[in-house]
Amino acid sequence: MKENIKNIHMIAVCGTGMGALARMLKDQGFEITGSDHKVYPPMSHFLRDAGIEISDGFNEKNVAYGPDLVVVGNAVSKDNAEVVKMHQMGLAYCSMPQAINRFVAAGKKPLVVTGTHGKTTTASILAWILQAAGFDPSFIIGGILKNFNSNYRLGSGEYIIIEGDEYDTAFFDKGPKFYHYHPCMAVLTGVEFDHADIFKDLDHVRQAFDGFLSRMYPESALFAFTDDKNVVELMREKSCRMVTYGKDAKAMWRLGAISVDPPWVFFEVIQQGFQFGIFKTKLIGEHNLVNALSVIAMANELKIPKEATAAALETFQGVKRRQDVRGTKRGITVMDDFAHHPTAVNETLRAVKPFYPYGRIVAVFEPRTNSSMRNIFQKDYTLSFDDADLICIRNPSRLDKIPPTERFSSRKLVADLIRRGKNAHYFSDTESIINHLVKEARHDDLVLIMSNGGFDNIHERLLQSL
């Protein structure tokens, strides 16, 4: 890369990570331009509010001005018009993780949060506890932290929190993004099969995480969730220091007694067999308490007093799109959640149930990811909705991207759920779901909407219709 860089162009700038990086670079004084396919809110507003010029669509003209550096997003192929022009002009280029290392993480100590589930929430709790403790951290995380109203921060402190993604880096680097980061501490929340578009099977996923752990320095510490047998296997013959956490009695940090007094959850933390403390949070679900447990252990390692950690956890407001209440109408609560993997759907439904004891849990699910639109999880989803009283399954809107023999069937899922005695319904479009819920939803019901996308703005449209 050039030493004197002033102008940076970002291809596929509207991804969550790329958008955050664009704002960070802009805040550092670089001139930023960007392009993407289908530029729309909220990311378009997020970038334009910072004065970043965005081009809708990929065109060689977007790089013709000759930026000093081009950052290429992982969704971009080698035959992209801007990539072709970039090569023709001999422009310097790099991937998003390379840019993070060069411009954001340089000189800082990375705290990297990895795992199939819970990365965003865990990294967000960590960022808030460090900020509340006066560490002034930097972070780049895959969700909007309500405490900061942002998914990034440039702090003056020595630590940077990075959500470590196992997804591939770029067309010229098919290794996972997290291979680029060398943490002084890392969290591994668990390992399951996901990202069926790039991983063949669970062994393939394990190989990616094995590579990450093998790259950790001996003086680094890994906070590992040892209730997960895949994590336990991956820990073998690694040189870094291991700190275990979970519900298992053998874990160094263990989740103890739990009590719920809405909106609060109280939970006990056991360290090496002795009570470390009682904490309270508005986070819902045992899986989120385990996420918080990993951060409590790391905060202790960072010499943050447990009283400061407890106070920060109480004021942690959560992450947008993670059990995010969007509104209440006619006594019906509408909640947004990012859950899409079968395990995440199951855990989220189980988590919210104690908090809405007087009404029904209405699950609304849109299969939209490259994995959920494939039949790889067809059977698993059948067992994921047991805690829902009414289930609405939308037909995937982007199935044309999946080979016919690999496609997930919403109709089959609904039929299988009905066979198991569940009140399940199939819908071909979002409008039909809204019309159905306006008629069927009742006072005290929770409508839990699960998707990793915008879902045609169903949340606001449903609230308006109610």
Image (cartoon, rainbow, N blue to C red):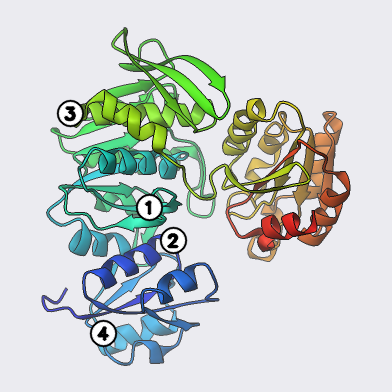
Foreground: disc 1 or disc 4: 1
Q: In which quarter of the image is residue 113?
A: top left
Question: Residue at label 4?
Answer: 67
Amino acid under disc 4:
Pro
- The amino acid type found where label 1 is placed reads Phe
Q: Which residue is drawn at 26% across and 69% down?
A: 27
In the image, residue 346 lies at what x, y percent? 63, 33
As drawn, the label of residue 131 is none
Distance from Cα at disc 4 to Cα at disc 3: 44 Å
Q: Position of residue 2 (x, y in %)?
A: 14, 77
Q: Which residue carries the number 3 mark?
A: 303
Between label 2 and label 4, give the one nearer the viewer: 2
Residue 286 in view of the camera: yes
Residue closer to the observer: 245 or 216:
245
Q: Residue tagged by mark 2?
A: 16
Residue in the image at 30% along x and 92% along y = 65
**Residue at x 83% of width, y 40% of height:** 442
Q: Quadrant of residue 21?
A: bottom left
Real-space CA distance between mark 3 and mark 2, rounded to the nearest whole angstrom:
32 Å
Q: Which of marks 3 and 1 is in front?
A: 1
The disc, 2 or 4, on the residue closer to the chain's N-terminal end is 2
- N-terminal label among 1 and 2: 2
Residue 148, which numbered label?
A: 1
Question: Residue lying farthest top?
Answer: 273
Label 1 vs 4, first from the N-terminus: 4
Type of amino acid under label 3: Lys
- In x, y percent, where is residue 266? 47, 20
Classify residue 142 as left or right of residue 354: left
Q: What element carries label 1?
A: loop
Q: Do the residues labelled 3 and 2 touch (CB within 8 Å)?
A: no
